[in-house]
Image (cartoon, grey):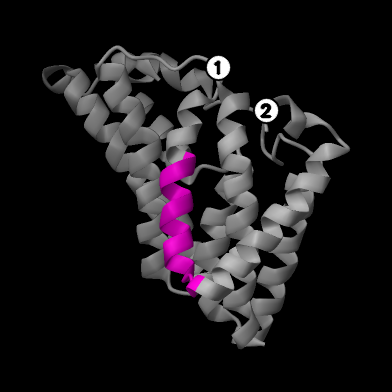
Amino acid sequence: MIIMITRARVSGCFGSSMVAGAVLMLSALAGAALTGAFAGLLGAAVEPSTRALLAAAAVSAVIVGAALRPVPWQLDRETDPRWLGYDDWRTAAYNGFALGLGFTTRIGFWLWYVVPLAAFVAADPVVGAAGHAVFALTRVGLSVLLTSADVYIAGGITRARTMADPLALAALGALYPVLAPLL
Amino acid sequence: MGGVLTSPRIRPALAVPVAALGVLAGHLAGLQPWALLVMAALIVGIAQQTLP
């Protein structure tokens, strides 16, 4: 993350890490809001009973996946390293947007799936966008804060899963009672 | 659950009751999708700081 921020430059006179961090953050919010709004719109586009069936199938599939393996279904890659070669605002903007989208890079935790699934179930693009924006704020905002404070969290993903995986399973389970009245 | 969570036998056995607890909690507490959305977004955003 620090490479993304320090390599980001915004047209010379704006070439500060503050501006780069802001560009990163705003791009992440944009990417997240788009994803969340899309998930919410998809939910709103189908009849409640169809939405319930689709969501129940997806929730069940993710529960089965989470029950069988610790590493979630994901694109096991980081943001494109070629973006670091840009010596301008694009490094921050592209990285931020990709991290905000979430699913185009490593997600690491089954809990991530609860976010778009809950947005789909909520069937409201505004709620979806707001929820995903919370994800972007936490995901990228915290990274920026940690980087600026020179704090790095290396590894620990297995330990983090011991907390995140039970929460993911419980949250996925908690979606079923929400779906039942829609059928 | 640590290393236990990676065991292909124990992991499913632990997952089922936890998911069932979630169903019960969702039913009793009347959890709304937006609340689950925000909770998951916050926690996964924090957890992803450990990503390699």
Q: Which amino acid does label 2 sit on?
A: Gly
Q: Are marks 1 and 2 in contact (CB under 8 Å)?
A: no
Could you tell me residue B39's position as x and y percent? Answer: 43, 53
What are the residue bounds of the magenta stretch? Answer: B29-44
Pointer 2 chain: B
Q: How many C-alpha atoms fall within 10 Å of the one at disc 1: few (<14), some, or many (≥20)?
A: few
Q: In which quarter of the image is residue A28?
A: top left
Could you tell me residue A146's position as x and y percent? Answer: 31, 21
Q: Residue placed farthest to the left in the image? A: A13
Is residue A106 shown to the viewer in this render? no
Q: In this view, does A73 lie above or below A79?
A: below
Tell me the tag on residue A155: 1
Q: In the rendered image, which quarter contains the C terminus of chain A?
A: bottom right
Q: In the rendered image, which quarter contains the N terminus of chain A?
A: top left
Q: In which quarter of the image is residue A126?
A: bottom left
- Indicate whether residue A107 is drawn in magenta: no
Between B30 and A51, the one nearer to me in the picture: B30
Q: How many C-alpha atoms fall within 10 Å of the one at disc 2: few (<14), some, or many (≥20)?
A: few
Q: From the viewer's perspective, tell me whether residue A119 is left or right of residue A109.
A: left
Q: Which of marks 1 and 2 is in front?
A: 2
Could you tell me residue B19's position as x and y percent? Answer: 69, 57
Please give the residue where the numbered disc 2 appears in the rendered image: B2
SS under mark 2 = helix
Q: What residue type is labelled 1?
A: Gly
Same chain for labels 1 and 2? Say yes or no. Answer: no
Residue at 44% of width from left, 17% of height from top? A153
Q: In this view, does A158 lie above or below A55?
A: above
Residue at 50% of width from left, 24% of height from top? B50
